Image (tube, rainbow, N blue to C red):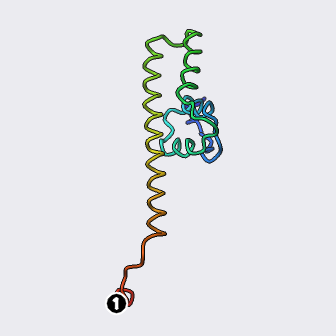
Amino acid sequence: MGLFRRKKKIKNDTNTEWTSFEFVQHLIKYPDYPDEKFIIMYENLLGEDNLEKDMEDYWKRRLEESFISQEEFKKIKKAFNHRFKKIRKLSQAKKETDSIAKWAVTNTKDERTDDDIRK
């Protein structure tokens, strides 16, 4: 929640291109953002997928600044790694589904008979 108990408005930038660092920053800032939105963001990832490294770098800085403890760091790291795996898996499944759908549309013959068409 934002100032004066109003819900923060999240700008819908899912269709823009994201660096790995920006992706991690968005996930940290908006942890309750729907997985479907993160999947779209992940598909628009620029460059290499360094999510774990960027996340770890961010939280290590927080650890060094004494904002979190070592134990909290381990829990956060585990939670983020789990979320990254889930996003990657869902993104891959979406790609495979899209691929199968495209194949089905282009490779399926119209098997209806003339009698079926007239009905």
Q: Nearer the viewer, residue 105 or 67?
A: 105
Quadrant in which the C terminus is drawn: bottom left
Q: Quadrant of residue 65?
A: top right
- In the rendered image of this protein, does residue 111 appear above or below residue 18? below
Looking at the image, is 110 positioned above or below residue 46? below
> Can residue 92 be seen here?
yes
Name the residue at 54% across, 32% down: 27
Residue 4 in sight here: no
Task: Please say if 52 is above or below 9.
Answer: above
Q: Mark 1 is on which residue type?
A: Asp
- Using the image as rendered, state which of residue 110 and residue 66 is in the foreground: 110
Residue occupied by mark 1: 115
Q: Which quadrant of the figure has residue 116?
A: bottom left
Q: Nearer the viewer, residue 56 or 106?
A: 106
Question: Residue 11, position in %: x, y?
Answer: 62, 42
Q: Residue at x 44, y 59 (%)?
A: 100
Badge 1 crowding class, 10 Å Cα cut-off, few under 14, some 14 to 19, many 20 or more, is few
Question: Measuring 47% from the left and 40% from the top, which residue is drawn there?
Answer: 88
Report the label total: 1
**Which quadrant would the N terminus be assigned to in this image?**
top right
Q: Position of residue 85 (x, y in %)?
A: 44, 35
Q: Position of residue 15 (x, y in %)?
A: 62, 48
- Residue 76: image location, x then y, percent: 46, 22
Q: Secondary structure at mark 1?
A: helix
